[in-house]
Amino acid sequence: MTAPLAQPEEASNLPVPARLDEVKGWFWPADQILFDWFLSRQNADPSGGGDLLELGAYLGKSAIFLGGYLKEGEEFTVCDLFDSPAEDDNNVDEMRRSYATLTRRAFEANYRAFHDELPTVVQAVTAVLPDRVRPASCRFVHVDASHLYAHVRADVETSRLLAAPGAIVVFDDFRAEHCPGVAAAVWGAVDARRLHVLCITQHKMYATWDHPEPLRTELAVFLTGREDLWHGVEEVAGAPLIRITGRKAVPPPHPRSRHETAAPGPAEEPVPAPVAVPSRRTPPRRSPLVRRLARDLLPPVLTRTVRRWL
Ligand SMILES: C[S@@+](CC[C@H](N)C(=O)[O-])C[C@H]1O[C@@H](n2cnc3c(N)ncnc32)[C@H](O)[C@@H]1O
């Protein structure tokens, strides 16, 4: 763990978030549901383990959420420039325009409101990560730092180097008008057919450097049971890609802040609406998408098992 720059008492003049919603950032309910699904699935797999990594933490919104899935013996690394100067003019300009008031102290104060221990903080450009994180060690990598093509292209490569077998890699802002460099870098890796897309939401692409099955089919089964998420499938670069929208998405429970008061009020977390979860007793209707994915993508022996289940 990195020594914190600010002790809690030094940071006491910073506002403390009582709920994750109060932490400024860009991490929306549909993505919270997907982070929860991928990370919970990994945590339930006794053979699965590995570290967590975030490139671009800002004030900690997604990092606080990710930290809730860290298991004993694993390491969570976040990398951000925070209040350090960037190394090239374009990145300096990007930092000044978008994150002028960001400080590491504020990140740490926010993180400590939800977790006892800080993650390992690398306060530097993301280019240093291959020297700071063990190759093939990370089971989940969230890439959400610079929007500039050269940086993101390097971040994509870093995610490949540091991804453990079967790792999930997530790219933020992979398609927005204000960040064409991210789109070019990320889709470039898909086009070269090395990066396999599992699904996309409005803001993030979820992918793997490994074989995407049976993960993609399992995801489609999960989505079929979610009434608060719309999903469809489209063939892109020769592979099925699941599109997800979730304007009414009901987020999973958040990590609790130690400053949360017990008194319920209007700002209280919405009570999650019941979500249809596949159960053995009442088999849910499988969507044509699930059936198609299972038929087209699974090896024959798995397909037979899934068919029986369907
Ligand atoms: C979009 S914000 C991250 C948002 C955060 N993940 C969330 O969910 O709220 C991008 C962050 O990347 C950082 N950043 C920008 N360029 C960087 C670089 N080259 N290396 C490291 N961090 C960088 C910025 O300081 C900023 O905090």
Image: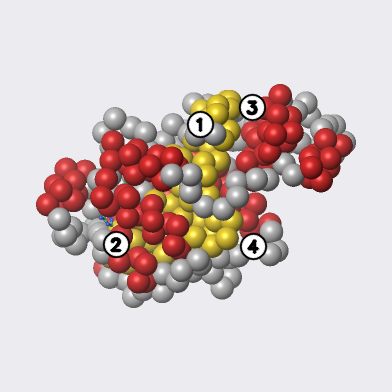
Say which label, 2 or 4, has the lower sequence index: 4
Q: Which of pointers 1 and 2 indicates the residue nearer the eye?
A: 1
Residue type indicated by callout 2: Ala
Assess disc 3: are there few (<14), some (14-19) or many (≥20) residues with their C-alpha within 10 Å of its C-alpha.
Answer: some
Q: Any mark on residue 48, and which?
A: 4
Q: Which of pointers 4 and 3 indicates the residue nearer the eye?
A: 4
Residue type indicated by callout 3: Glu
User: Could you tell me residue 35's position as x and y percent?
Assistant: 53, 47
Left or right of residue 254: residue 5: left
Reply above or below: 21 against 92: above
Reply above or below: 56 against 196: below
Left or right of residue 169: residue 42: right
Ligand 1 within 8 Å of the CB at mark 3: no
Q: Any mark on residue 227, and which?
A: 3
The reply to whether residue 19 is in sight is no
Say which label, 4 or 3, has the lower sequence index: 4
Residue type indicated by callout 1: Val
The Cα–Cα distance between marks 2 and 4, rounded to whole angstroms, is 27 Å
Assess disc 2: are there few (<14), some (14-19) or many (≥20) residues with their C-alpha within 10 Å of its C-alpha.
Answer: some
Assess disc 1: are there few (<14), some (14-19) or many (≥20) residues with their C-alpha within 10 Å of its C-alpha.
Answer: few
Instruction: Say which residue appears at 45% left-offset and 63% top-offset.
Output: 162
Q: Which of pointers 1 and 4 indicates the residue nearer the eye?
A: 1
User: Could you tell me residue 52's position as x and y percent?
Assistant: 49, 61
